Image: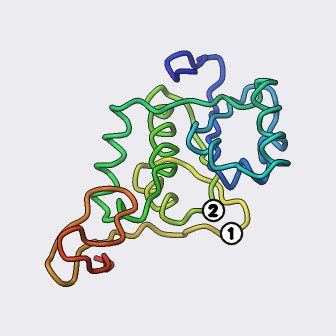
Amino acid sequence: MSLGNASSRSKLAIVLDTGALIAKYYRLLPKNNVLVYTAQSAVEEVVDRENREALLEAMQLGLINVVEPSREYLNKVREKAREIGGIHRLSMVDVDIASIALQLASMSYHVVVITDDYELQNLLLYMNISFKPLRTRGISEFRRYRAYCPVCGYIPGSPMEDECPLCGSRIKRKRV
């Protein structure tokens, strides 16, 4: 499904990350006037049989819309993550989830992302997108970081870069 097909009749869009899918959070949401989205990459992370079957059933019943974020919003989210020094700590699923949320927000939806991921919460806070933690307290303030290689000065530009491709040292970050 494409986000371009999203109905404007509902103004609340919930975006679920993998943890919310495993927790079956979609079962707790009202069925009226709420659109529920997730990324295909998040669906692929649900591998245990019980949760996978429940998720597939919810998708078949139309409780969850599985979408791919557009390249435009993926690029915007990656740039925002670079601005705050968090790009290397985000997974590809985190980037997909944030991109879907940003795209829905640009379509005048009130978006709430359900996630316990602190790095994703920090990015969402920076982008002025609401979030709700599941099992944690969540973050209370935005933090900006500078990611770098302490040996050669390399600055990571892609998600999940833990090691410097130039010298092999572990990527570090400090709060700025």
In the displayed structure image, the side of residue 172 where residue 8 appears, left or right: right
Give the residue at x 43% y 66%: 142
Q: Pinpoint residue 38: horizontal percent, then vertical percent.
A: 61, 38
Instruction: Say which quarter of the image contains residue 62.
Output: top right
Give the residue at x 31% y 72%: 163
Instruction: Say which quarter of the image contains residue 26.
Output: top right
Q: Which residue is mark 1?
A: 136
Query: Vertically, is 21 above or below 170?
Result: above
Q: Are marks 1 and 2 in contact (CB under 8 Å)?
A: yes
- Badge 1 marks a residue whose secondary structure is loop
Q: Pinpoint residue 54: horizontal percent, then vertical percent.
A: 84, 40
Give the residue at x 65% y 39%: 14
- N-term-proximal mark, 1 vs 2: 2
Give the residue at x 78% y 24%: 60
Q: Amino acid at mark 1?
A: Thr
In the displayed structure image, the side of residue 139 where residue 34 appears, left or right: right
Here the colouring is rainbow
Q: Amino acid at mark 2?
A: Asp
Q: Which residue is mark 2?
A: 116
- Badge 2 marks a residue whose secondary structure is loop
Name the quadrant of the C terminus: bottom left
Name the quadrant of the N terminus: top right
Separation (CA) of disc 1 from disc 2: 6 Å
Label 1 Cα crowd, 10 Å radius (few <14 / some 14-19 / many 20+):
few
In the displayed structure image, the side of residue 176 where residue 121 appears, left or right: right
Judging depth in this view, the residue of 165 and 64 nearest the camera is 165
